[in-house]
Amino acid sequence: MLENKMEQTIAQDELHEECGVFGIYDLDGQDVASTIYYGLFALQHRGQESCGIAVSETQGPKGKVSSFKDMGLVNEVFDAEKLERLKGDIGVGHVRYSTAGASTRENAQPLVLNYVKGTLALAHNGNLINANELRHDLEYTGAIFQTTIDSEVIAYHIARERLKVGTVEEAVQRAAAKMKGAYSIVVMSPRKLIGARDPYGFKPLCIGKRDNSYIITSETCALETIGAEFVRDVKPGEVVTINGEGEISSDMTNAIDPCKQGRCIFEYIYFARADSHFDGISVYDARIKAGRFLAQDSPVEADLVVGVPESGNAAALGYAMESGIPYGTAFVKNSYVGRTFIKPKQSSREQSVRVKLNVVKEAVAGKRIIMIDDSIVRGTTSGLIVNMLKEAGAKEVHVRISAPPFLWPCYFGTDIPAREQLIAYNRSIEDIRDLIGADSLGYLRIERLKEMVSGLPICEGCFTGTYPLAPPTEDIRGEYER
């Protein structure tokens, strides 16, 4: 029990995204399961709790869907034999980290729904703030839920709307119009692949093409991995449909004034992979800018700039480029720590960090170090890493964070806890510096966030308490388990 608690403590001090989605339609009729597997592999950073794939044959019996999902990483859940059994030329896949709904196999996605018009398979990234209300509407008309996630609410509303309209894409648009919050969705119907993005553009979604296949996925890095070319981003508020002739149709009925949009800034700071880009902005370039801004606004004399892998690395390089202080590698990250690794039995919480991260003593001994990280949530991990650097012989450790202090929770798909659990809540910068044991501490200024993304409208709610749309009056995360 003790080692499980230790691991949870460390995990709770890291930020988590909710999900990654991937959909593909091969117009030549080739099986797509293995391509979805590699696409999900590229999106693994977006969720490590569970994953799944659902496929269908567009030329076969209408409504037959083959699917498999389970707890664990993509390469733990799927092997060649399982993929071979998933026959179909259209499909969707999903990787999940739960911010609403328990981490159980039942809540893994994609969700497959059989109803009077056929079948739907749905993969969803984000968080609806009116999911309870939408769920109650369905429950009072006899719906029976198999999961505790808002994605099932979305699937049911799409199915209900499909009974009233002529096409599945119109049903998706009408269901989306009822939703409030963050969503990027990929829907597989028997003959179409559909993507939908919320009007605020909280979460990324893009379209790609490889030979005679079309893809809708969370990040461009998944397109690169499977050798597909980027076509364009799905616009905030847009519903896109890809049919059997390879035609891409667009419905912008749900779109709002672009000035009111609010992309999650943490996609650029932390969540998205550095080689991705969305809405015209390179994630890598945005992180380099953040580091440069930190060097301009929070300079300090030092011998070496280092990043906490992986998301701190690009910001650290930006800091080094701007300051002229050499950039170096101080940490070695164990990339093979999955859900199945044997947890350490030592009573020290620090052991859990050391399993994932080690310091290169020769790189830091006797030096003044500037350590760049993307965030401080509860502060537990930051304090342990600072201590590890000092144990390795660093003379000074100056911490710079490529985001402003977290002061408010997130309701739109990022696992930022209640205010009382945030280290910055009711504490000064000096208080935080003292708690994590750093020689100095500097955060990115809020004014710099829009500069990072060349003026794109963004959501700054977790820093300012001002959200693009009114948040719920109570914490809705995990509501269905209560």
Image: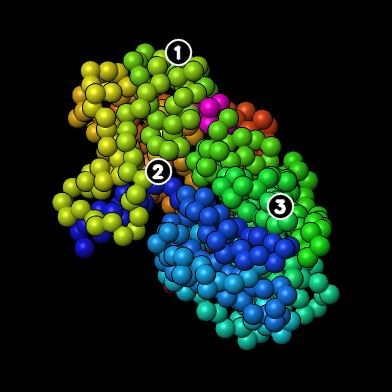
Which residue type carries mark 1? Gly
Gap in Å between the C-alphas at discs 3 and 2?
A: 44 Å
- Helix, strand or loop at label 3? It is loop
Q: Which residues are magenta?
A: 286-291
Q: Position of residue 189 (x, y in %)?
A: 70, 71
What label does residue 404 carry, if any? none
Residue 384 in sight in this render: yes
- With respect to residue 212, does 110 lie above or below? below
Between label 3 and label 1, give the one nearer the viewer.
3
Residue at x 50%, y 23% (from the top left corner): 318
Q: Position of residue 375 (x, y in %)?
A: 43, 38
Q: Name the residue carrying label 1.
A: 324
| Main SS, magenta residues | helix
- Helix, strand or loop at label 1? It is loop
Q: Name the residue carrying label 3.
A: 211
Residue extending farthest left: 346
- Helix, strand or loop at label 2? It is loop
- Circle 1 packing at 10 Å, graded few (<14), some (14-19), many (20+), is few
Which residue type carries mark 2? Val
Residue at x 53%, y 23% (from the top left corner): 293
Gap in Å between the C-alphas at discs 2 and 1?
A: 29 Å
Which residue type carries mark 3? Asp
Q: Name the residue carrying label 2.
A: 377
Q: Position of residue 309 (x, y in %)?
A: 39, 37
Q: Nearer the viewer, residue 220 or 238?
A: 220
Q: Nearer the viewer, residue 152 or 48?
A: 48
Image quadrant holding the C terminus, namely: bottom left
Q: Nearer the viewer, residue 141 or 240?
A: 240
Magenta-colored stretch includes residue 166: no
- With respect to residue 344, does 61 lie above or below? below
Between label 3 and label 2, give the one nearer the viewer.
3
